[in-house]
Amino acid sequence: MSWYRIVVTFVTVLFFCTTVVQAKELRVLSEDELIIQGLLSDEYGAYENSRQIFGKLYDTTGAKEYLFREVTSSLLSRSHIPQSIKRLKLWDKAHPDTLEVKRLLIPLYLTNQQVQEARTQAEHLIERSTEPRDLDLASNPYLYTGEFKKALDLLNRVYEKTHNEDVLLRMSVIMDEYTGERKKAIQLLEMHRRMNIVDSDQLYFKLLELYVKENDVNGVLEVYKLLYEKNKNEKYLAKIIDAYAYKGDLEGAIVFLEKNKIEEKILYELHKAKKHFDKALILADKLYNKDKDPKWLAEKAILLFENAKDKHDTKMLNTMVSLFDKAMALGVDDSIYLNYYGYTLIERKIDVKKGIKIVKEALKQQPDNTYYLDSLAWGYYRTHACKKAYKLMKKVVDREGLEEPEIIEHWDAIQKCK
């Protein structure tokens, strides 16, 4: 066993043995031994034991350092608070204007629910000190008494001297919840963010909370961008996309994703939604080459058709058919692709019977889908199966009404079908 481990073991055993020492036994130990006992008690969080030891040292020597340590242990253990107040006030009477006494009396009074007494001590402390730690401490009684403007003024003075982020966050809570200065709180937080290095995420989370309360989507979006830039966390990216969608700014989302060279699949869907078919085709090729998922062949077929200026162009239609057939041969059987392909075969009179067959496969997956029923009805119409077409189309009209131009066109034609 190393010398270090022997020493650590000895000290640990010594501590646990001495924590059970009663007050009456403390007097047999020397001052140095008692100091060691007290410090060890503090280190291990045995504050009640520490309070007794330093209390004994103070009674024996009258040294203020032991009194202050006794009172500090009392605060940490939340025990013997009235007794500590009494002992500290006796010292204060004999030694007036000791700042350390004010610093200890404020939390003691607050712990003992003596708010006005704490406020009085805070006033004395402010008169004698402009140190940030004293101004910070003195702000607490004013919060308890509901004097939020006064507390805020003190904390603001602390922040101006220290630029402490924790102090600013406390100020922002007060401004938001008690003084009606939410917009000002946002300004202060934003200014701090721009002028200082922000290590933790707490400031960003507070900004998010305030922007949400203000219903400021742009503010929320910018903060999530900062968080994503800082952490590259996928949940922040999802929030960014959600914010752009909420704003209806798909172009903004596209610019963000292209700038950061991320989430090509989401970028593809956005290009597709905005009818940027040329860019979507490039991405579909890239994604297919990357993962060889045959669904991208079906996607390319759709984009090729949608992007065509001439929907009757033979070369384009042949390429589309080839892409769809290859995709299906490789296992693509999603009903959305099947219906799109089947309906296009029917509508463009490329191969109506094949189109009907493919649409029926889509309906096996979603038998009540009115879009698929419409496609099949149109296929029957193209083959002059008028009764079948009418029966299906009536079901579509009964459910969907006559709102969409394509349904109106099909319904009018099928009703005239003989």
Image (tube, grey):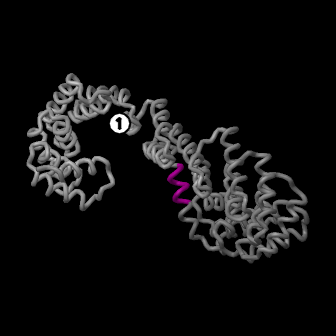
User: How many tags in the picture?
Assistant: 1
Q: With 381 as the anchor, is 56 left or right in this view?
A: right
Prevalent SS, magenta region: helix
Magenta stretch?
7-14
Measuring 61% from the left and 50% from the top, which residue is drawn there?
Answer: 207
Q: Residue furthest top?
A: 315
Q: Secondary structure at mark 1?
A: helix
Q: Is 384 a magenta residue?
A: no
Measuring 17% from the left and 46% from the top, which residue is drawn there?
Answer: 378
Q: Which residue is mark 1?
A: 265
Q: Quadrant of residue 306?
A: top left
Position of residue 121 measured from the top left corner of the image (x, y, whole percent):
84, 67
Position of residue 280 measured from the top left corner of the image (x, y, whole percent):
35, 30
Measuring 87% from the left and 61% from the top, which residue is drawn there?
Answer: 98
Amino acid type of the residue tagged 1 in the rendering = Lys
Q: With 4 as the anchor, is 74 left or right in this view?
A: right
- The foreground one among 173 and 210 is 210
Q: Residues within 10 Å of mark 1 (few under 14, many from 20)?
A: few
> Is residue 103 among the parts visible in the rendering?
no
Q: With 138 as the anchor, is 342 left or right in this view?
A: left
Position of residue 153 measured from the top left corner of the image (x, y, whole percent):
81, 57
Quadrant in which the N terminus appears: top left
Q: With 357 as the anchor, is 217 left or right in this view?
A: right
- The foreground one among 1 and 304 is 304
Position of residue 158 measured from the top left corner of the image (x, y, whole percent):
78, 51
> Is residue 27 among the parts visible in the rendering?
yes
The answer to whether 86 is drawn above or below residue 201 in the figure is below
